[in-house]
Image (spheres, rainbow, N blue to C red):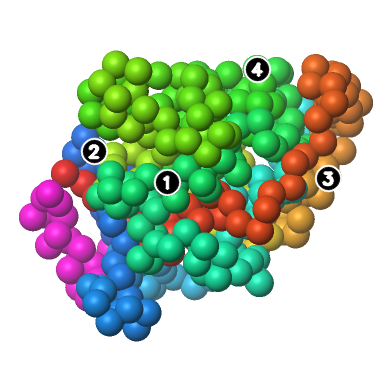
Amino acid sequence: MIPSGICHLHVELSQGRALGGNREMKMSVLTWAALSQGDRISLLEPSRNSGHRKDRIQGTRPFSLSAAARAILGVGRWGDNGGKQKLTLQDVAELIRKKECRRVVVMAGAGISTPSGIPDFRSPGSGLYSNLEQYNIPYPEAIFELMYFFVNPKPFFTLAKELYPGNYRPNYAHYFLRLLHDKGLLLRLYTQNIDGLERVAGIPPDKLVEAHGTFATATCTVCRRKFPGEDFRGDVMADKVPHCPVCTGVIKPDIVFFGEELPQRFFLHVTDFPMADLLFIIGTSLEVEPFASLAGAVRSSVPRVLINRDLVGPFAWQQRYNDVAQLGDVVSGVEKLVELLDWNEEMQTLIQKEKEKVGRGSEPCFPPSVSLFLVLGLFWGEQVHACWG
């Protein structure tokens, strides 16, 4: 349940009345509400638009803190730089080279995985709805609702087969993050992706926060026993629904469904972001809460670097003087940064070494017309918001 104080604040903020004209206080309250309330954050079941189905519950678009901030704070597109010179990507590279940034936090989204062959859910012509017709489900998001999963888990595992770890390979952007780790610079990588490519690239689990879950582990839906996800790969690849060897309950990968709590590791942000001295935001729309609000959780003196197709979040409505936006293709943006860092040779050595480990099959596997990642991304990006209880 959302505390009454938060509900009241939600209404006041939505109507633009709360906190008067005190901009700093408004931002403090928004950040507090987004990041510090309660001990649980979960994904809520999406509102269903009655325009698609007559028998579906009509609802409103979930509240987005990032969208609310734009309207409530009354700020323009650019923040007040206080006369300071705008930071550039070259400046950020120099800070790293001079070891003035040693605690790097990264926020990664769908755009970091598209070069590996996983389609971006926002790409035109993806044909999501038509491709889901083959599964004969009542509505697309049902695949990621627990109640539907309990009744009919087959559609989920049919899609899971396409994205199970081993079907795709990391790309240049993943290996850049690996190199940050190898150099002792990576404090933590927060990812919205469930494809596991960060792990495949060699980033250790203790450096990862997989905000929307992982295939690396699985849980019995009946007895709640935990298992390594790899134990059930054979069943999934053979189009079988995996069952618990102890109680025969259905085994579900630890992917966050609507209504489920986010992983407890997500709360590492409480200490990680205040400690960070550099923030990279790569390939994300910054639309999904509570993940999106993390972009504002670093200290104002900390440089934030966006490598993305478009301006998003605070980069679109209130940039700081030390914000840097490298727009366009994600891999091209990372390559430019690597060149400025003079890490080209180290990157090529790392990539070659990892390819030799894999041998044949090191090239990305391209998916069929629809992937689980595409579906999850669409509904998380459009339907999800935070719940404090």
Mark 1 vs mark 2: in front: 1
Q: Which residues are magenta?
A: 1-22
Q: Check the image and name the residue furthest to the left.
A: 4
What is the distance, in whole Å, between disc 4 and disc 1 at their CAs? 43 Å
User: Which is nearer the N-term, disc 4 or disc 1?
Assistant: 1
Residue tagged by mark 4?
A: 184
Mark 4 vs mark 2: in front: 2
Q: Looking at the image, which residue is at 87% across and 38% down?
A: 339
Helix, strand, or loop for circle 3?
helix
User: Which is nearer the N-term, disc 3 or disc 2?
Assistant: 2
Question: What kind of residue is marked 1?
Answer: Lys
Mark 3 vs mark 2: in front: 2
Helix, strand, or loop for circle 4?
loop
Question: What kind of residue is marked 4?
Answer: Gly
What is the distance, in whole Å, between disc 4 and disc 2 at their CAs? 31 Å
Depth check, front residue: 280 or 85: 280
Is 76 above or below relative to 351?
below
Task: Write down the quadrant of residue 165 in the picture.
Answer: top right
What is the distance, in whole Å, between disc 3 and disc 4 at their CAs? 21 Å
Mark 3 vs mark 1: in front: 1
Question: What kind of residue is marked 2?
Answer: Arg
Q: Is residue 122 visible?
A: yes
Specify few, some or many for label 1: CA neighbours under 10 Å numbering under 14, 14-19, or 20 or more: some
Q: Looking at the image, which residue is at 34% across and 83% down?
A: 51
Q: Looking at the image, which residue is at 24% across and 77% down?
A: 55
- The disc label shown at residue 40, or none: 2
What is the distance, in whole Å, between disc 3 and disc 2 at their CAs? 39 Å
Q: Is residue 58 left or right of residue 103?
A: left
- The disc label shown at residue 154, or none: 1
Q: Position of residue 293 (x, y in %)?
A: 41, 50
Question: What kind of residue is marked 3?
Answer: Lys
- The disc label shown at residue 336, or none: 3
